[in-house]
């Protein structure tokens, strides 16, 4: 799905005369992808000079571009700061990553627990990008 198509789908949703939060069509995923340590080497914000010269993980490039081409939404969600936006966008373009958006300033430190009114799925990157598979796991949820 092209950037323009995604933007149109995610904006100006109106039901019964009221603006409402959009919901992606069935089968389309909204991927939030970390950068450092996930699609390339783990580069801390304190060493921004390395951001321009690091190499992408080949399986990450192949898999993410495949997901993009399948119509999914790709958003890079990174702990890099706004000061690193230009070098990051240049690097992504140089290596051929297809994506729709990028959010800077994700909290650092890990141990994320995301609370949202929309369905959230989390997949921990452990060194290799592949197609996702289904597994049964125990998760923490709010009490009914």
Image (tube, rainbow, N blue to C red):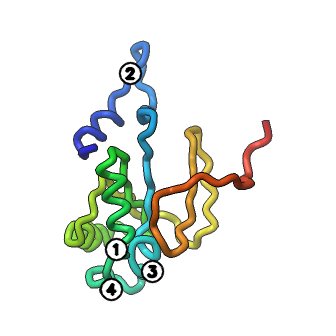
- Closer-to-camera residue (86/39): 39
Q: Residue 50 carries which label?
A: 4
Indicate which label's residue lies in the foreground, 2 or 1: 1
Q: Residue at coordinates 25% horizontally, 46% vertically from top-left?
A: 3
Q: Mark 2 points at which residue?
A: 14
Few, some or many C-alpha atoms within 10 Å of disc 2 (few <14, some 14-19, many ≥20)? few
Q: Is residue 9 above or below residue 79?
A: above
Quick one: label 3 or label 1, which is nearer the N terminus?
Answer: 3
Quadrant of the image containing the C terminus? top right
Residue at left offset 20%, top offset 71%: 94
Cα–Cα span, label 3 and label 1: 15 Å
Q: Earlier in the sequence, mark 4 or mark 3?
A: 3
Whichever of callouts 3 and 2 sits on the residue coming sooner in the sequence is: 2
Q: Which of marks 4 and 1 is in front?
A: 1
Q: How far apart are marks 4 and 3 (CA)?
A: 10 Å
Q: What residue is disc 1 on? A: 58
Q: What is the C-alpha distance between the residues marked 4 and 1?
A: 18 Å
Does any portion of residue 51 appear in the rendered image? yes
């Amino acid at each position: 799905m092209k950037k323009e198509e995604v933007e149109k789908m995610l904006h100006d949703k109106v039901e019964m005369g009221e603006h409402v939060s959009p919901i992606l069509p069935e089968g389309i995923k909204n991927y939030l992808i970390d950068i450092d340590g996930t699609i390339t080497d783990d580069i801390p914000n304190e060493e921004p000079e390395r951001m321009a010269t690091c190499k992408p993980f080949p399986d990450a490039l192949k898999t993410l571009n495949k997901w993009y081409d399948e119509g999914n939404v790709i958003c890079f969600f990174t702990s890099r700061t706004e000061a690193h936006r230009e070098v990051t966008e240049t690097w992504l373009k140089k290596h051929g990553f297809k994506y729709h958006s990028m959010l800077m300033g994700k909290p650092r430190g890990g141990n994320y627990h995301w609370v949202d009114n929309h369905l959230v799925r989390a997949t921990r990157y452990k060194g290799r990008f592949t197609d996702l598979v289904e597994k049964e796991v125990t998760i923490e949820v709010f009490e009914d």
